[in-house]
Amino acid sequence: MKYISTRQQQETNIKTAILKGLADDGGLFMPEYIPQLDSEFFENLPNLTLQQIGFRVAKEFLGESISNGNLKEIIDEVLNFQIPVVKISENIYSLELFHGPTMAFKDVGARFMARMMSYFSEGKPMKVIAATSGDTGSAVASGFFGVPGIEVYILYPKGKVSPLQEKQLTTWGGNIKALEIDGTFDDCQALAKQILSDEELNQKFTLTSANSINIARLIPQSFYYFWAFAQLQKLGKPIVFSVPSGNFGNLTAGLFAKKMGLPVHHFVASTNENDVVPKFLETGNYEAKPSKQTISNAMDVGNPSNFERMQSFFNNDVSEFKKEIVSYSFSDEETKNAMQEVRKEFGYTLDPHGAVAYLGLQALQQAQSDKVGEDFVGVLLETAHPAKFVEVVEDVLQEEVIIPEKLEAFNKKEKQSLEFPADFELVKTYLMEEK
Ligand SMILES: *Cc1c(COP(=O)(O)O)cnc(C)c1O
């Protein structure tokens, strides 16, 4: 299988696509075609374990670049936690993606990417650059922590991540360095892009990106769509996934799963007030904007990096987008109300991101007569444990949130970060002095 840049100027294999992250022409790698899974796989799907699904799906994308034995080992290591499908109400289920080591869904993608990179780099030294709005950085840090030869630089926006997120970014030490940038997440993302495309830095180091632009993050994120579908198929209703979206990596992975043959009825792209994609679907015009700060801060993205991938997926045709995806944007007020409603009516605690996804399902249910035409089962992707956003959740629900031991451990450690203004030259000077 070849991997081709969305800007068409580079074509390579999976190993290079993963090690490079971003293509030389500034585009994002996409598989040449989306592989199809056979009918036997789908007939057998309800009997497969999450790991078996992961192996089959990953194999399609990786082909002969890795042996079955090595791939199996990596998949089993990556997916060493549960991804339960929990019923919230009659037709609404929560796909709990937060049972990994940092308690956010990004663990799935980051753990897979870290292991694939370390497998393909064969022990050669490498620098991994990751911009984060909160959760990516910690998942990436956790995935790479202690991997020999790999140094990780995490760029995060000063004062714009939660106190616990900050602890999860800055307390690793060892091969993980946290760069605290005086700016927004978009500034961090822009800096990461500049670093990765800088000639001098590239001459001195082997650089790569750990953002959702890396294809190795997307591949494993498609596994759990199959997994959730397998649990809910027996209900005999159309299945809709609502994906709380920021950079749209999670949603793009869902599109991959559908194209591989999974009969998903619709996707709901649910966003907070950073609404460039819902606006695009409404008007046909894509207009990147500065990001706005919201209570679902991991989705505060004004120029989603995977938009370019979705455009290439749909051949730049907005009418093709609209066949698969409906999209809604919600305010913080609406998000808080949804958290309260779900807690009160169903006894389930949503984090602010999951609450945005819940609202997306509700909005589609209200519009369902024209969009889906019948009763559907809605699956919201619950992307973070509520304790990751304890300040917001406690304030909204007026009740105490128990912090799981896994998270409490971070709180007890000392923050270590290096502060920078959002200035590429200063960050570059620092990196040039690194070993
Ligand atoms: C990153 C993140 C999202 C958004 O995912 P994308 O793939 O960037 O769209 C949603 N919720 C949480 C908790 C996240 O960390």
Image: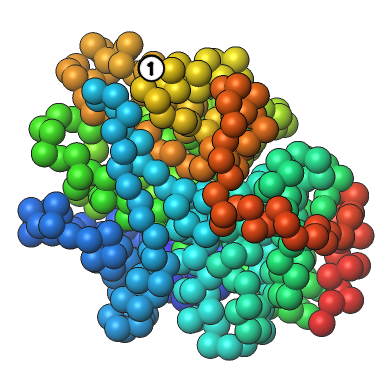
Q: Quadrant of residue 360?
A: top left
Side of 308 relative to 398 (left or right): left
Image coordinates of residue 104 in percent, x first then y, are 52, 49
- Which three-letter amino acid code belongs to the residue tagged 1? Glu
Residue drawn at point x = 46 percent, y = 30 percent: 349
Residue 57, above or below 400: below
Q: How many callouts does the rendering have?
A: 1
The quadrant of the rendering that contains the N terminus is: bottom left
Name the residue that disc number 1 marks: 345
The quadrant of the rendering that contains the C terminus is: bottom right
For residue 204, say whether it is visible.
Answer: yes
Q: Quadrant of residue 171?
A: bottom right
Q: CB of residue at label 1: within 8 Å of ligand 1?
A: no
Residue drawn at point x = 39 percent, y = 44 percent: 96
Residue 232, above or below 124: above
Image coordinates of residue 374 in percent, x first then y, are 17, 18
Report the colour scheme.
Answer: rainbow
For residue 299, say whether it is visible.
Answer: no
Side of 365 relative to 318 (left or right): left
Mark 1, Cα crowd under 10 Å, few <14 / some 14-19 / many 20+, is: few
Residue drawn at point x = 69 percent, y = 47 percent: 164
Q: Nearer the viewer, residue 194 or 131?
A: 131
Image coordinates of residue 102 in percent, x first then y, are 56, 55
Q: Nearer the viewer, residue 363 or 207?
A: 363
Secondary structure of the residue carrying numbered label 1:
helix
Residue drawn at point x = 19 percent, y = 19 percent: 375
Image coordinates of residue 394 in percent, x first then y, are 62, 28
Q: Nearer the viewer, residue 153 or 266?
A: 153
